[in-house]
Amino acid sequence: MKLISREFIRTIAPQLDLLNTIGGGVAQPKLHVNKRPKGVVLHVAMPSVPAESFHVVLKDSQLTVYGEYKHGPEDRLAAPLFVQTLDLPRNLDLASINASHENGELRVAIPFRDATSREIDIQPGS
């Protein structure tokens, strides 16, 4: 005998996160950074949070990833679900950040800067 349907659980889960946040708690997503040969990939796993609730903001060398809950798409008020700010190292190409969302996980890929060196021609003085 089922007392609670799966649809009810799917519908109520974001509200429970919202109540936890309003009550002073903050949801903590599973977050990890993988170093790859071509750059780094930040993974943020929150299966109950849709892609449109995630935000990725770059300011100077700080990357902020946050999620917010809105009851409906047209709502102006939103409650924060989580916020994570990372200081990025200088060897990353901040102009080439790429973000995607798939299967309840946000992926932010940041490639390394091209580390090739070149000789600078010296111009004769006048």
Image (cartoon, rainbow, N blue to C red):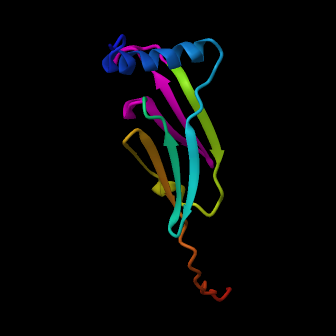
Outermost residue, bottom direction? 124
Q: How many numbered badges does the structure rendering display?
A: 0
In the picture, which quadrant includes the N terminus?
Answer: top left
In the picture, which quadrant includes the C terminus?
Answer: bottom right
Outermost residue, front direction? 1
Q: Quadrant of residue 80?
A: top right
Camera-side residue of 65 and 113 = 65
For residue 44, side relative to residue 86 (left or right): left
Look at the image and say whether residue 24 sits in the magenta stretch: no
Q: Is residue 104 above or below residue 113?
A: above
Camera-side residue of 62 and 48 = 48
For residue 44, side relative to residue 70 (left or right): right
Residue at 53% across / 55% down in the picture?
94
Q: Is residue 29 above or below residue 20?
A: below
Expressed as whole percent of the image width and height from the top left, the position of residue 119 reads 60, 86
Residue at 32% across / 16% down in the picture?
5
Q: Is residue 17 above or below residue 123?
A: above
Q: Quadrant of residue 52?
A: top left
Camera-side residue of 21 and 75 = 21
Look at the image and say whether residue 51 sits in the magenta stretch: yes
Residue at 58% across / 16% down in the picture?
20
Camera-side residue of 16 and 116 = 16
Highlighted magenta segment, given as a residue range:
49-78
Expressed as whole percent of the image width and height from the top left, the position of residue 92 reads 58, 60
Residue at 44% across / 42% down in the picture?
105
Q: Is residue 10 above or below residue 103?
A: above
Expressed as whole percent of the image width and height from the top left, the position of residue 77 reads 46, 13
